[in-house]
Image: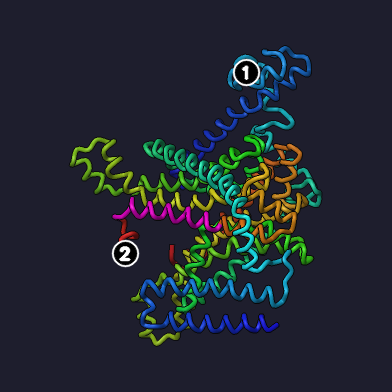
Amino acid sequence: MTLVVFAFVFWLVAWRMNVVLANSAASKTRLIKLVVPIIFGFTILVVWELVVRGLSVPMVILPPPSTIADTFLAKLPILWKDFVQTFVKGALSGYLIGCTAAIALAILVERFDFIRRGLLPVGNFLAALPIIGTAPILVMWFGFDWHSKAAVVVVMVFFPMLINTVAGLSETTAMQRDLMKTYSADPWQAFIKLRLPAAMPFIFNGLKISTTLALIGAIVAEFFGSPTLGMGFRISASIGQLALDMVWAEIVVAAIAGSAFYGIVAIIEKGVTFWHPSQRG
Amino acid sequence: MRRSFLPIIVVIAGLLAIWYAAVVPMNIKMALTAAERSGIAVTPVGAKERRDRSAMLLVVQNTFAIKDTFALERPRLPAPHQVATELWNSTVNKKITSKRSLVFHGWITLSSTLLGFAIGTGLGILLAIGIVYNRAMDMSVMPWAIASQTIPILAIAPMIIVVFNSVGLQGIFPKAIISAYLSFFPVVVGMVKGLRSPDQMHLDLLKTYNASSTEGFWKLRLPSSMPFFFASLKIGIAASLVGAIVGELPTGAVRGLGARLLSGSYYGQTIQIWSALLAAALLAAALVALIGLVQRLTLNRMGMS
């Protein structure tokens, strides 16, 4: 019980600290902006640890963070293999294929106004559907290995990517297109120099949304059948064994992979669309 | 909308045509095996011979089998009309209390979706208000709320179901929790943006009226957040539905659309999978359209659209 009281006290102290930091004169500096959320996250971990230990919550309900960290370090080789199977083979290859195909189709289709007007609403509609439900079908078609996971990812990222690219490619104003004409640019030059760069913020928006979708698709598809390997397989198998520390360790991997993937795409975006107002600020 | 009516029809017709065209090569091997078994001459003879042949070649060699590919009982890819028939049979022609009725399964999924969506949205709005009015909360929570969007949180869905099961909670509630946390973060992020959308000029105007901060909230911040609110509701409800469907998987195919998907994939009932998928798609579309309708009515009434 003392641990729970201690958790409460720790929470109060940390919160007080954050209030002081957030309202201090230095609150606009980068350091404070970084420190405050870190204190908050750390506090949650400490409170979680203390409450779980203090109330002796059984392991099969909620393991404390320290146990999860131990499992994470001890099972690193297994986690790495799962990561390669699900992320590198399944999610990443599907992401690359799906995004390339969607961008290519968008560029092809964008020249025909008629198709574009039909494709945008239909694409918007399809992007809002629970596409993850195609997972059992694709697992049936492409087998249990990573190919079916990549296929699920392709289907999942395709439509968000398509509508973003099509929307981006029609982003230029008449004035800009006229300028290109006064330069006597041929259609190809106008595309490379004007329309494609103008579409980049939209394309990257789609690419960023797709990073999360890719990981979700690859993990959930494994719930429908997989070799004895992979993050989704490990999650469902460990749940069966009530090894929740392993499940949480996989979730840590998924979280790290997801944010790193997103972060890398965001860094590339910064390099490509450095001219855009949202990147200059 | 009128202007794009014809293009939409053409695109949908194109998709259906691709679907029909794909059915033939996808199912040809199965159809040929069935035809051979019933004594029809097939080139080349024997399923083993045909296994490594390209599907296109087989179609050309056995043109008689093309119509069979649309009528298999467990096709690799069912034709659109087969799925539509199955959907019709399992919704309209079945009593809604029947275990085979998609209305029954759809309702199971829908009820936990809506419950979770309501919880998630409510909590999301509360947190957004806290973030907007409390600087410490903003700086502590907001980065995590944004970061959580990049994490595949759906992965913990099976664990939530099993953990709640072991505490004795079953049925609608654990699934609703998953739906709730999937819709929670989009609503928080959208609402924070919305509640901050009034510009300085408007906020200053309220100050000259000597409005309290509560009045400022009800008369300025909340109304001007509405477009953002509805945009995040649309994302949230779609995410909630996905959450409820995935939440039905680990309990092992009992009830709900997710269970239909899973049992279909266990028993190779492809038509059942496709019709459950189509039902889920229609449900998602209906929910998003409903929110869109409320949005239009509300914004019209507020004079914002």
Viewport quadrant of the C terminus of chain A: bottom left
Vertical arrangement, residue A11 with respect to residue B80, above or below: below
The residue sitting at the front extreme is A74
> Is B88 within the magenta?
no
Q: Between marks 2 and 1, how big is the CA–CA gap?
A: 60 Å
Residue at the image point whose x is 18% and y is 42% from the top? A182
Q: Is residue B107 left or right of residue A271?
A: right
Mark 2 surroundings: few (<14), some (14-19) or many (≥20) residues within 10 A: few
Q: Nearer the viewer, residue B247 or A239?
A: A239
Residue B274, by quadrant, is top right
Q: Nearer the viewer, residue A181 or B85?
A: A181
Q: Nearer the viewer, residue B11 or B177?
A: B177
SS assignment at label 2 = loop
Amino acid type assigned to the residue bearing label 2 in the image: Gly
Residue at the image point whose x is 65% and y is 61% from the top? B178
Q: What's the image's color scheme?
A: rainbow
Q: Position of residue A141 (x, y in %)?
A: 64, 34
- Residue A186's disc number: none
Residue at the image point whose x is 24% and y is 35% from the top? A186
Count how many numbered circles sit on residues in the image.
2
SS assignment at label 1 = helix
Question: Which stretch is magenta?
Answer: A255-275
Q: Position of residue A168 (x, y in %)?
A: 38, 48
Vertical arrangement, residue B208 with respect to residue A74, above or below: below
Q: Which residue is mark 2?
A: A281
Q: Which residue is mark 1?
A: B58
